[in-house]
Image: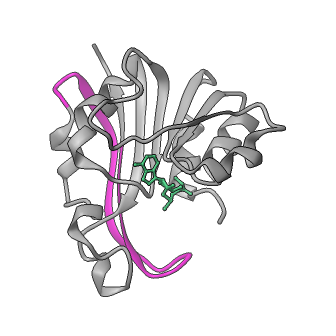
């Protein structure tokens, strides 16, 4: 899969800095960020992905993001990117990863996507406005999306691009 055009568009607004790709999978966005000059950590629980990152500048961290213990305590990044992953119980910890002045760029499927196929479980679907209201008052919302798309295949896409202001 190619990187998301919505994500690429917003990456252009961020100066290359420390970035993390949360639940990075095969790294379509991690590698795109590295190409743009970001210093990138890609996190995923799947150890089989390690070989994809081995010869690259992207640092791969294999860890479970849904355990009782949050594995990224005390880590901060200038850009926290999440794509096609949702685990609400750790929202607060996830938002804490964003450094002061840093960005959260989050895009995944939205409620209504079940009409088109998977994911269809509400646990994996964002509600309209949900992320913006979950962010503390310390974030400025720069852009939000919640819309039906036809490309690369019919889906409901939801997302937020936000900046920590304090
Ligand atoms: C649908 S893929 C999205 C991959 C990538 N973000 C993208 O947009 O191409 C979801 C990824 O989340 C990872 N994942 C699922 N549960 C996880 C967990 N508990 N901890 C860490 N990674 C997890 C999976 O291994 C998979 O690579």
61 is within the stretch colored magenta? no
Q: Is residue 27 visible?
A: no
User: What kind of colouring is applied to the model shown?
Assistant: one colour
The range drawn in magenta is 136-160
Reply above or below: 13 against 39: below
Residue 2 screen position, x and y as percent: 66, 62
Looking at the figure, which quarter contains the N terminus? Answer: bottom right
Looking at the figure, which quarter contains the C terminus? Answer: top left
Query: In the drawing, does residue 58 fall left or right of residue 123?
Result: right
Residue drawn at (20%, 60%) of the image: 128
Give the overall secondary structure of the magenta segment. strand
Reply above or below: 117 against 3: below
Residue drawn at (39%, 14%) of the image: 74
139 is within the stretch colored magenta? yes
Q: Quadrant of residue 54?
A: top right
Reply above or below: 56 against 118: above
Reply above or below: 28 against 104: below
Q: Is residue 26 visible?
A: yes
Query: In the drawing, does residue 88 fall left or right of residue 43?
Result: left
């Amino acid at each position: 899969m190619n990187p998301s055009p919505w994500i690429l568009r917003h990456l252009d607004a961020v100066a290359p800095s420390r970035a993390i790709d949360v639940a990075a999978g095969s790294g379509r966005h991690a590698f795109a960020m590295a190409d743009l000059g970001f210093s990138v950590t890609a996190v995923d629980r799947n150890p089989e992905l390690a070989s994809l990152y081995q010869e690259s500048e992207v640092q791969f961290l294999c860890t479970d993001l849904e355990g009782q213990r949050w594995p990224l305590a005390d880590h901060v990044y200038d850009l926290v990117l999440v794509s096609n992953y949702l685990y609400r119980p750790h929202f607060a910890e996830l938002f804490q990863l964003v450094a002061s002045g840093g960005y959260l760029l989050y895009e995944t499927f939205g409620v209504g996507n079940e009409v088109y196929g998977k994911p269809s479980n509400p646990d994996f679907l964002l509600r309209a406005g949900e992320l913006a209201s979950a962010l503390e008052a310390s974030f400025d919302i720069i852009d939000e999306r919640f819309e039906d798309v036809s490309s690369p295949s019919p889906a409901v896409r939801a997302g937020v691009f936000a900046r920590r202001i304090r």
